[in-house]
Each structure stands twice: as structure tokens, then as C-alpha cells.
Image: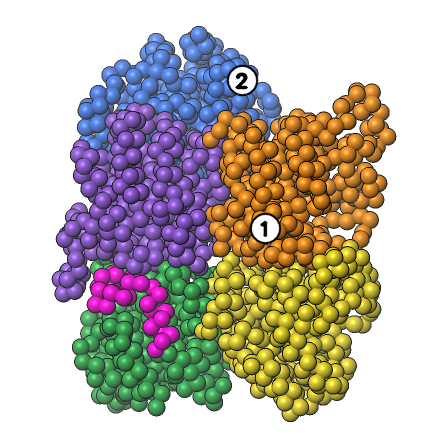
Chain colours: A yellow, B orange, C purple, D blue, E green
């Protein structure tokens, strides 16, 4: 056990040893094991965006086993997916990669202004499948966010009691926000804060832009001269908003990018800003297998340096 | 145990000894211990207003440990915060300061005319974290207030049965009220009364103005010549509305003020009007550490005289 | 919070913050507060031996309030008693002294060879009465010990989950043991070990004699030359058997002694041997009030030095 | 409300207002209302001894309504009976006399050396029938006493939570005791103590003899010169054993006596010794109606003086 | 994941992925990770034999942290202990070594002819503490074995449902067996079979002698010429009795031996006979630290070759 992992675990002293153990399992797994940094493969896009949009670019991805293998071969810290994808491979790959059960989900068959996610898997499912954590999404900014907070919190309490850490995908969205506002730096920091206050052990947010959405916030950012010009400054600010580094914050990669270097630069900015890692889906599983492995190899090298 | 604390506890004879014990713990802790007066540090603004607006003015406040330490060093009676902030320090500071779990919360990512607060922590959480009380907000004036009353009351019943006192933040707000009405003296008294009728052991209200919001009320205030000209008279009236002094009423400090003397004068008015104390967040944690300690020292001296 | 109390709490990292908080409350209360040592007043003899045998020597002790006051005035860490005695004063003395609910009890109306204790109070009672811990007795050596272990463990699990530390009175007794064996050093160490393995946060045992009860044990004590000649050596050995000092072990005073110096010498031996303190009933409440206070004052001075 | 009743209620501060209210109802009802003394009519002998043995001497007693009327006409504080007897009249006499549901019962169809009582009515029954309290028997001295303590305690916790005071019939009996021991003064005091420790609000014991059953107790009674020569001294001692007068202790009348004066002398001794009253069954309902009323009139006068 | 571990997991296809995952965690951990062989450190002797008999030979072992560290440093597959020992270190060593909660236990304070083990920890405890498995003992041969089978099976069912593998210590003992019969080859094979039939994922038995206890069995062993002359033949036979190698069987080391070579020869026999590994307690923790590490190094080399 490295000193860095010990330090990270020491930020979670109120949790039971089961939660600490599963956090350690994820932190110690894969090529980044022991560094305190994490790269996670999430594949919930089949549900979120539909299978063709998700898997046609690399049709090996229709097969749930493909993603288990990708995460294992690349040496990632964990693989996160909805119930069905995990059920399709949990026995086959038992013990080979820490699993995160993405327990609520949302499809894009309708485009509501204000949405929420359906709870589609139980804490018992996570135990039965040998998962190391459960993942839940909230939509700060949705008119339905309060119900989401209540549901997510009740679920999280149950999960932690049986030793499962809670990962919150905090994705600002809904009628209260402009499109730009969904990734605005003030909103991103706010979303990270809310996830932490709900008891998240790991927070997943999008990389923020330098847009400021709320007037009341803009005054403060300007008056206090909060540095948000560069991406690494913005990462640093989000980590600060997540209990000043006392909670693991990881950043999602967003849609597949054509320019790999753009992604690598983002990773460098995350690393430089004190982020704990990345959760990268489309940018990996929408590439051909070898390209994905090479792409991830570069990312892991950046984090592992 | 001082006579004053005994007198206060004797107002709560219908409560079980567990509730009395936890009330005593808060009343007996810190520099005001035994005086019957309380100063509490609340830090739920990260959730209510967002982290940057809350903590950028004194960025040490991004760190949840900072607030535990501030409350302990200043010698306050208790520290109140949402689940995440308490989880981040409850084990580290176990037994050093009475904790109040702020169990429902609301963010400002949307500006609803009529809002409510999500229940984001359970009574079991409060026990597991070693808290001395739970805190809940109601919005008298909101179109959703009835649901809030029901939820808050059900939660409070469960909390008291296991010995946890209930603190109600009674904050008039919503489409039924003008902006001035939110702090109108008639509304403030009304809000205090409702909190008490819901079974609150401690009521938190804002300092009222001399505005009168409701016509039906104005007639009575004028006819009965209820004295509300000075702040101390208004405090006295709110205390009267809170079961004539049989329930602990504390006053919130509101936004950070530039002029300290203004705050001190308010504290003197609270003391003179028979208020039981203050719950002061932004005016303390948004100052630099030493200034906050000095500021609180003055306040505790006023109350402790 | 002293460093010593921090060190003690750090031995209980698997417990939730509620358990840590209540341990801290007891460790920080009274004249020994902060020293890491504890003196507790237990008054369950009315049930164990009958009221006349217990209270006639100092008939003020028939009154349940007497014991609350004695523990408060003497500046002890906590007061332990069965349900009825606590119910008779928990509201009157709320917040003045940490309470331990002695939740199982046994009377001496029959003299069974193998006995057990009836569960006579619930975890909910402990919460309702504002207690800081629950206490339970086991009889290692009784033919019924296995059932006791199961009952005590189930109760303890429930108590810890709501933040209540568990004190186990580990009293060897029953058909498997000779009378001398009940306080034999090997049996005392074994009894302490079992209590710790059951999850006790605090273990209460009798002061051991240098008798060795079990042949299999005697061989080891002799071969390994375990030092047990003096009382302080035996205390040190029992503390060693209680997870090598990682669990709080306190020693009971036994029947009232005529010679005070004998008790004081025992206390010195406990202190010297690394014991955490004493739980002294009959030697205090069977004296007249002033004598009891003076007697306890001497004991607290020995421990507090 | 008299000062005396206020004083009595103040001994039960840990109880909820529902328990206090029902205690007050019984203390304030009937001719002794407000005096702090109680006379209760118990009719569980139909179950305990069989109907013919119980009711043939005055065959009006076969009719359950008879006992309601007797208690009402005599101006007693309460009427106690098993489920069936209460169901047979609770609607007819609703509101006319406080009812105590005798919730466990035992018949004499077999004569076990060690016995227990069956739980034959629920707390819900007591609420449904409008009862003011529930009554439960324990047999200290029985080899089955531990199970009885557990059952009675669990039932009592449930009853008090819904505002029903608990009356414990503490009747020493069983293989551990000689026949004389069942009413021995040491055993009677012990039985009263155990009932109080179990959380009884009212304790019912038999009038004790000057026999001392236990050797360990005799030494103390003799050494401490506990006065037990007269009945009033013994009553005083039992009241002392019942938390020094902080719990209501009432005495049963036993089998029907031929000599009324003997009963009256007992009542005077109870009064003189500080007992709170009597629970008199066979000595009243086994007399003809007018004689019973006259007999009770004398008793109430003794208590009411 | 090695082919061998895949093969082993493929024998457990009826189990849920959680059970497979935790089996894999143990099989993949430590220096034997991936070989399909296991060496586990069990430390329940403090409870089974008493602390002095267990830990005096190497008094570092009184400290629960010592055993965590020993298992970690030696590179073992798992550490098994009762609740208290795990609670004392589970947070400190979270994620460093797979833990097995030994959930039933028995002390040697009495020497019953027919005994059973008390359930002293729950499945929830195992989850809360982050364990990889639970361990339970049965005593085939005891008059109480049927109750043990029922209890163990019910517990195992609950454990597997939440993904925890079940390790059964199958220890023939009781009035039905001679002393020699406890390790007789026919009894050992029978004990392994029963454990497997109860649903054990891992079976722990003692190394068998060539004694045959049961006449009915002897006839068959002789008629069928079952080879049991050498230890490796007997190991092979026990593995055969454990579903012909379809269940993991590990062998316990028994009391500390003076001659190390004797142990190493046993290990070689286990390896040669197709046993899956060893569970070695006293032979390791009763040595000085460096000697234990060297001793285990030799054993791991034998298994790992």
C-alpha cells in the first residue's frame, strides 16, 4: 500500500472498513494502482444514447464482453456499466477488474427539458455481482433535482452500510441552465460540491469551460479573482469545490474527439490541476481495439508519470 | 449544571431524557456553556449558494476541516452542516464539538418562486455520525409549505424518539410573500410559531424588520400597539411568538456585513430582547481565520456578560 | 482534546463516528477527563444482590438520585445502572453525567450452577434515555455461555450501529470453574480476550489472583515465565490479553473492603500495570456520602497523577 | 390537581406525558382521588384459581359487569382484570372507571414448581379497550424468571411508548424459595426492587412477614438493624426497596380473611408505613355486595384520613 | 487471470459473480496469486485456547495488528479471524489483505463432550468490514452437529446471496468419535464431504491419519483397496471426497511443531496429493517474526514451484 493511497483513504475516516477496502481495491488496481490516480471505463451510452449511436463506430462494442476485456487489457482501475452489461460478463471476468454498477439510467428517446434517471439496479445487485462501488447520476439544474437528491441519497446510505463506495455522476442539466451553463465553471464547481455534500466518495464531473452561468457567482469570481483562465486552473477550482481535495474527483472525457492530442492535453491539465483521474468512454470504445489500447496507454503514462 | 440551563430544560418536560441530554450538551458546551445562550456555526452555504460564492472570500473554507476547527477554537456551542461536510470530519473531531446534521437542503441552481428542500440525510446518519441534533428548514409562504411541514414533522418525530432534538430553520419564502415580507415582523413571528407548533426544540429565524406584510395582521399590531419599533422589541416579540420564551429561539446573521459594529449592535438587541443566541455563518467563515476568531470573541462576550 | 484521548480513539478506527463520539464523551468527562483513565460508578447490585444487602450499609443509596449525585459530585467519568435506576433520574440529571445502560441483569434469588442474564432493556431505551453506552455481562465458564455470547453480540451490533459503544462485563462463572478459578489469572486473561473478540469497546474484569485454573494454561505460564507474581504484573497481563492495550480495560473493585489502603494499593497497581481505570460500586455507595467522596478523591488523585 | 399528585408525577420525569396522564387518571379517580393513595379492584382469580373457587362464595361475581359496578360504586381508583373480563364490560362502562389490562396470566390446573405466565393480551388490546394501564406478573424465585423478565420488559417498553403505565405484580415463587420465603421481608424487598428496575410505574407486592429467607441477606438485616418487627416497619422497608418511595407501591390483600379488623389493621399499617395503597380482590368480591361496599368504605376512610 | 484460477472458478458456476469475485480475490492475492494454491493465516486461537496459550510463545501476537502485518509481509492469500481481531485492524489495513470473518467460535473454558460454536458475528459485519469470505466451523461427530449444520447452512445461504464465499472448518469431534477417530481417514473424508454438501466453497480439514474409525467404512476401504498408506495418498483421498477436486480443500497445520522439516514434508504431501493449500496458525504466529517469515517463505516456495 503506497503512502498516497493511505493518505487518500485517511480522508474517509467516517466510512466503515468495507467502503475503505473497496476504495483501496479500485485505487490499487491496474497500471495506475498505488499512484492515487484512476482511469475508469464507463459504458452506459448504450442506454443513454442508444446502441447504434454508441457502438456502430466500433461494432465490437455491441458485445458486452468487449468492454470488460478492454478495461482489463488496458490496465484501467475499474469498469462502470448498467446492470445488464455487468450481468453479461461479471461471472466470466470475475476478479479481473473492479466493477462499478451504474444504478440509475436515462435514455434519449425523448428530449425533456427537465429529466431524471430511473433506478434500475439495487444494492443487492451490486453485491451479487461482486461490484466494488455503485454509481448514480444527479442533474443539478433540473426541476426534478430535489427528487434525484433524495433518491440518490437513500440509495447511497444503503450502499455504504454494506461497504460499497458511492460514485456520483454530477451532470448539470435542465431548464434552469443554458447549454453553455451545463459546463460553466461556476456550475461545475457547484455540482461537485452538491455531490460531495450528498456523501459521494468519488465525484465525476465534466471538464468545465470558463463560462460563468450565474450572475451571483460571476460577481464573486471576479471580485475574488478566482483563476479560471486555463483548464488546469479550472480543474484545480473544481477539486477545491470538492472539499478542497478531500474527495476523489474524476473528469469525464465527453464525446469522441478527432484530435487525440486535444484529449492528452486535457489529461495533462487534469493532472496538473490536481484532478484524480478520468472516466473515458466514447473516446476509447468507439475506436478500434488496438487504437483504443494505444490511446489509453498514452493517457496512463501521463497520469502515471 | 447552572440554574439557567435547568430552567431551559424544564420547558421541555414532554421530551424524553435523550432529547434533554442532547439539548444540555449544546447548552453546556463552549464559552457560553451554562449561560443559556448559544452561538452556532452553520455551514450549509456550499449547498445553498454554491462553493465559490460561499468560500472564495476566505478560501480556507473550502476545506471541511476548517469549519470544525473554527467552531472548536472559537468556543461555540455547536456546528451545523449537511451530511457531506459532517462525514468529512466527524471521525477526526469526534467529541470535540456538538454536531447538528442539516438534513434537508436546497440549491440555488434554479430560482423557483416556490421551492422546497430535499431530504438528504437520515436520522440513522445523525446517530452514526454522533450528532447532538438534526436541523430542518421550512419555507412558510411557499406553495409547497404543507408538504414541507409533513416531511419535516415525520422526520422530527423519528429523530426525537431516538433522543435527537430538532432545530427548525423557519425561513418565510415563496410566491405568497413579497421580498420585504420574508423578514416582516408579523411573518417572522408567524414563522416562529409554526416551527414551535411543529415540535421544534430550537427555532432559527432571521432578524425581523418593522415591515408588516399581512393586512389582517397589521390591524392587530396597530390596535394592540405591539411594540416593534426597535430591533430588541422585535426580537422580544418573536420570542413571545415562540411560546412566550418556552422554546429556544436563535437568530441568523444573514449575508456578510461590512460593518462589524452593525452585527454587534444586532447581537446586543437579540440579548436585550431575550433571544437565546445566534447562528452565524457567512459573517464568520468568510473572514480570515484570525479576524473570525476576534469577531466571534466580541459576540461571545456580549452574550456572556 | 488531549493527545492521549486521540490515541485511544485511534484504536477504534473500524467504529463509526457516533461510537467514537460517545467514547470521547466518557473519556473527557469528570476529573479524569483527558487523561485516558476512567472511574465509573456502577450500581446494579440492587438487582444482583438485592436492595438491603446493597443499600442498608448506607441507606441513602435506596434512592436512585443518590447515585447520580454521587457520580456527579465525585467527578467520575460515567454512571452505569439498570433500566429502572436510570429511568428514575435520567430526566432530572440530563447532561450532567454520561450514562451506561446495564442492559442485561441477573438476580441472586436462586443459586444456579450455570447461569445467564436476562436482557432487560433495549438499544432504543439507551437512545431514549440519552445514554453514552450500553453494558452487557457474559459468564465465560457457564454452560450457557454460548447463548450469552450470541445474545450479547447481536445486541452489541445493534448498539454500535446507532453510535453506542459496548461495555462488556466479563465475569467468569459456572460449573466449568472452581471458585478460585473465577479470578484466576489465566481465566481473567481469557475472559478479557473473549470480550474483545465479541467486539467490546470497553472490557470490565475483576482483579485477578495468581491462581492458574487450567492445566493447559499453567504449562504455558510456567514455560514462558509470564510474570504474574504482583498485582500490577497481573493487570499488565490482562491488558495484554485485551488486544495488547488496544481496548480499554477497567477493573472492578469487588466487595466493600474494610481497609481503604488495600483499595488504594490496588488502584496504584492498576495504574502501574497499564489498566485504564476502575469501576467501583460497593466500595463507594456503601460508605456515607462524605466518606465516599473523600475515598473517591484519593482514587482520582492516584489515577490523575 | 393536588400538590401530592404533582409530587408523585414528578418522580416519573423520564416517562412521556401519556404515561403521566394515565397515572394521573388513576390517582385522581374515586374517593381517594388527589390523596396520592390508591385502592384497586383486581379480578383475575377466575383465571388464577378457577371460577367456582373465585365466585361461588358470592355468585354475583360470575358476571363480569358485577366487578365494574363494584369498583365504580365503591369509588375505587381502578379495576384490573384479564382480557375477557374487560371485553365483557369495557363498552358498557366506558369512562366510568380506569381500567388496567392484566396482560399475562396463569392458571392452577397444574402445580408446577417453577412456573411462568402466558401473555394473553396485547398493548393494542389495552388501547382498543380504553385502558389506563397494563399489568404484568413476574415470579422472582422461579427457574423461569429470566424469561419472564425479558418478556415483561419487552411488553412494558411497548406499552409505555404509547402512554400506558406499567403495573408489575411481583410475586416471589418457585423452586428457589421456601413457602415462607415467598413473603419473607428480604424477598419482598428484593421483588419490589426488581420490578422497579424493570421499569414498573406501579409495583404490587404481598404484605411481607418478618421471616428472612436468604442467609446473605439475614446478616445484613441483623448487622444494620433494619427494623422489620412490625408490619408498618416492613411496609416502610419495602417502599424503601422500591426506589426509596420514588415508585408507587401497593399491597395485595391475599386470601379472604374472616376477621375484617385484621384487614383494617393491615391497611393502617400500610398507611403508616408509607405504602401507596391496596389492591384487594377476594376480600371484596367474595362478600355480598353491601358488605363489600361497607368493607371498602372503611378501607377508603382509613386511607383518606 | 491465470488458466488455473479460471479452471477453479469454473467449478463454481452455480455461484453468483460476487462469490466468484471474492474467490478470485483470495486466489489472486499474495505470492501464490494465480497458482490455484492458497496459504491462509488463521488466528482464532485467542478465543479457542485462550490468549496466553496462543500468544505467550511470541508475545507480539497479543497485538491484533501483528497478524495483519504478518499475513501481508509473508505474502499470504488471506487472513482469518474472529470479529474483534478484524475490527481492531480492518480500517488500518483496508485493502492490503483479503479478510475472512470467522463467524462462529468456541472457547475451551469448559470441556464438553459434545459442543457447538456460538455465532458471534453477522453477514452484515463481514460486509461492513470489507471481508472476502466468512468462515464457520462444524463438528461432525458431535451430538449437536445437526443444529450446527442447520445454523451454518442458514448463515452460508445469507452470505453467498451477498457475494461472500463460505469457508467451512470441518472438524470431527464429539461423543461419537474416539480421539484417534477425529483425524481418521474415513472420518476426514466424511467431514470433507459433509462440508461440501452444505455448500462450502472452501473446506478446511485436518491432515488425516491412516486410522479408520468406522467398521462399516473399514470394510470398504479394505475391499476396494483405497490407498491411504502415505500422507499424500490420504490427501488425495480427502480431495476426492470433496467432490473429486471440484471444491477447494485446504489443510490445517495443527499445533506448533518443533521440527520444521516435518511441516515442510506435510506441505509437500499436500501438494503432491492435490491439496489446494494450507491454513497455518500456531506454526507461524507462535514463532518470532523473522522465523515465521522464513518458515512461510519455505512453504510458499514449496507450493509455488
Farthest-out residue, right? B215
Packing grade of label 2 (10 A; few <14, some 14-19, many >=20) is many
The answer to whether A98 appears left or right of E296 in the picture is right
Work out how far the residue at label 1 is from the one at label 2, CA to CA, in angstroms.
64 Å
Local secondary structure at mark 1: helix
Tell me the quarter of the picture where residue D170 sits. Answer: top left
Q: Can residue E146 be seen?
A: no
Q: What stretch is highlighted in magenta?
A: E47-74
Residue E48 part of the magenta-drawn span: yes
Residue at point 71% right, 55% down?
Answer: B53
Packing grade of label 1 (10 A; few <14, some 14-19, many >=20) is some
Q: Name the residue under label 1.
A: B289
Nearer to us: label 1 or label 2: 1
Q: Can residue C7 be seen?
A: yes
Chain letter for the residue marked with disc 2 in the picture: D
Residue at point 22% right, 35% down?
Answer: C256
- E223 is higher (above) or lower (below) than E249: below
Residue at point 63% right, 71% down?
Answer: A273
Q: Name the residue under label 2.
A: D29
Q: Nearer the viewer, residue C18 or D140?
A: C18
Amino acid at each position: 500500500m503506497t503512502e498516497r493511497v493511505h493518505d487518500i483513504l485517511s480522508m474517509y475516516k467516517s466510512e466503515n472498513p468495507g467502503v475503505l477496502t473497496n476504495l483501496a481495491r479500485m485505487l490499487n488496481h491496474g497500471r495506475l494502482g498505488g499512484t492515487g490516480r484512476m482511469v475508469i471505463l464507463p459504458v452506459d451510452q448504450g442506454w443513454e444514447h442508444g446502441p447504434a449511436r454508441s457502438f456502430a463506430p466500433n461494432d465490437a462494442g455491441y458485445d458486452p464482453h468487449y468492454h470488460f476485456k478492454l478495461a482489463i487489457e488496458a490496465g484501467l482501475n475499474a469498469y462502470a456499466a448498467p446492470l445488464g452489461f455487468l450481468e453479461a460478463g461479471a461471472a466470466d471476468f470475475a476478479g479481473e477488474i473492479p466493477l462499478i454498477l451504474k444504478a440509475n439510467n436515462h435514455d434519449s428517446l425523448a428530449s425533456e427539458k427537465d429529466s431524471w434517471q430511473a433506478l434500475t439496479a439495487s444494492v443487492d445487485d451490486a453485491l451479487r455481482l461482486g461490484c466494488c462501488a455503485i454509481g448514480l447520476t444527479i442533474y443539478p439544474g433540473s426541476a426534478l433535482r430535489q427528487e434525484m437528491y433524495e433518491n440518490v441519497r437513500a440509495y447511497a446510505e444503503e450502499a455504504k452500510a454494506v461497504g460499497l463506495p458511492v460514485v456520483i455522476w454530477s451532470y448539470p442539466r435542465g431548464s434552469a441552465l443554458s447549454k453553455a451553463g451545463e459546463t460553466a465553471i461556476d456550475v461545475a464547481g457547484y455540482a461537485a460540491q452538491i455531490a460531495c455534500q450528498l456523501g459521494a466518495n468519488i465525484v465525476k464531473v465534466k471538464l468545465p469551460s470558463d463560462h460563468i452561468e450565474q450572475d451571483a457567482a460571476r460577481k464573486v469570481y471576479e471580485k475574488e479573482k478566482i483563476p479560471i483562465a486555463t483548464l488546469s486552473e479550472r480543474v484545480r477550482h473544481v477539486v477545491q469545490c470538492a472539499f478542497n481535495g478531500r474527495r476523489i474527483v474524476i473528469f469525464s472525457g465527453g464525446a469522441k474527439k478527432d484530435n487525440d492530442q486535444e484529449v492528452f492535453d486535457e489529461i495533462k491539465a487534469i493532472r496538473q490541476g490536481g484532478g484524480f483521474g478520468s472516466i473515458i468512454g466514447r473516446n476509447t470504445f468507439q475506436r478500434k481495439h488496438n487504437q483504443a489500447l494505444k490511446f489509453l496507454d498514452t493517457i496512463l503514462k501521463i497520469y502515471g508519470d
